[in-house]
Image: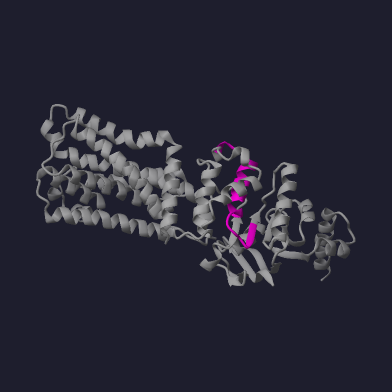
Amino acid sequence: MSVAITLATARRVLQQLRRDPRTIALLIVVPTVLMALFRWVLSNQRASFDTIGAPVFGVFPTIVMFVVASVATLRERRTGTLERLLTMPMHKLDLLLGYGLAFGAAAVVQVGVCLALTLGPLGLRVQGSVWLLFLIGVLAALLGMALGLLLSAFASSEFQAVQFMPAVVFPQLLLCGLVTPRAKMDSVLHAISDVLPMTYAVDALQRVTKTARVEGQLVVDLVVLALVAVVALALGAATLRRRTA
Amino acid sequence: MDAVVVSGLRVVRSGREVLHSIDATVATGSLTGLLGPSGSGKTTLLRCLVGVQITAAGRVEVLGIPVGDPALRARVGYVTQSPSVYPDLTVTENLRYFAAIIGAPAADVARVVSDVGLTPHKGSVVGTLSGGERARVSLATALMGRPELLVLDEPTVGLDPVLRRDLWQLFAELASGGVTLLISSHVMDEAQHCERLLLLREGSVLAAGTPDEFRRRTGADDLEEVFLRLIEGTTASELSS
């Protein structure tokens, strides 16, 4: 492990991102526009927007980061640069943490812009702290990134990588408690929902919506999110092979 | 002392044996050419030397250390056949990144850019360069730091003749400075630039030696003809045995 190599990798990923203004625009504009659209759809249901606005805000960065991260790492695998890096004095975690830092920085900007619009012009009202919303949003984006990095190992083309998004994200969307409250799910669905990480992001955002108190369960939610992201990154490291057939 | 020692190396890929019990050495400080038609297993053999190929049997030692040892990663430079650099970064940005990983001094970037004749393009995004220019960016990456062994997979294919001559001159300079170079090519003409040759055909070593030894053995002058006679010689002896 080397801090210098990790930082060099993060800088390189950000340089690549800078060369691609359209991706930057999509990263930042898409969640923001979707939130505005969501507010418009609920234009005469102010109370509904206040209830589910925050949980929905947490979902968009997860999806966007998932796609961007999985395609970025897939490209690294397919262009031969990954193989070259692994013949050099680079630890696998240097590479993944470098990606994590770069996309983490992108997530901070993405979530910050989206949150500023949602709380400002769109007028979302929550009981809890704005900073907590921000923290959960960034954690959710990092979770999406870590899952994207991991799943890119199982895709052999960009087509497949993009298809993983609905396969991995949509079941979580249906079961996270946004569509039906988790308390009303039957026991099988509830159990599945318990092991899906997005459930914890949505639960945390619902809690911040309802109360200013920082409850024990909220802390559990945040810890689970961070742990799943770390485990996904570690599993992602295991999928990077120095030796291949 | 040999920089590379390969013994009994076998590689099986999707059920087919592509390298059949290879024995070979590369002398330290030599400029050795790995020649053979495409599909003869050159790339697979080079991949074994840098430790990215899963092998079925045999031993590979590089600089006296079994391959796969992390200690080798800073001492061996490897250039793949298709350029493995970032198309969305500039030449300099690519090299700065790889320099940071190898731990090469920042001054190396300008040196290797000039070595491969890319100084006028150092600020260009690699994706906008021609295929040959991209290949040279990839080559430049391996020249940074102080590699003791350079493993280059067809680094001169498709390049302008003047540039090819310059690169072979650079390789010879590196070799006289003590660096060991193993360079593959399917163009038999390139053998004339090498001190030693390793001829690979259908996953086996057909012959090894200096170009002069080959000429004496076969009585041919032209290297293309030398190889033809070597290949036909083995086929004839295989038939008679």
x and y percent of residue A133 in the render? 20, 44
Q: Residue furthest front?
A: B107
When asked about the image quadrant of residue B60, the answer is: bottom right
Q: Is residue A148 visible?
A: no
Quadrant of the snapshot with the N terminus of chain A: bottom left
x and y percent of residue B189 in the render? 79, 51
Q: Is residue B81 visible?
A: yes
A206 relative position to B21: left or right: left
Q: Is residue B145 above or below residue A102?
A: below
Q: Is residue B218 magenta?
A: no
Q: Is residue B145 magenta?
A: yes
A71 relative position to B162: left or right: left
Q: How is the image coloured?
A: one colour
Quadrant of the snapshot with the C terminus of chain A: bottom right
Q: Residue at x 19, y 44 (%)?
A: A131
Q: Residue at x 25, y 44 (%)?
A: A137
Q: Residue at x 52, y 62 (%)?
A: A243
Q: Which residues are magenta?
A: B127-151
Q: Main secondary structure of the magenta part?
A: helix
| Viewer-proximal residue among A180 and B135 | B135
Q: Residue furthest right?
A: B219
Q: Is residue B144 above or below residue A54?
A: below
x and y percent of residue A136 in the render? 22, 47
What is the count of numbered marks? Answer: 0
A57 relative position to A147: left or right: left
x and y percent of residue B3 in the render? 66, 68
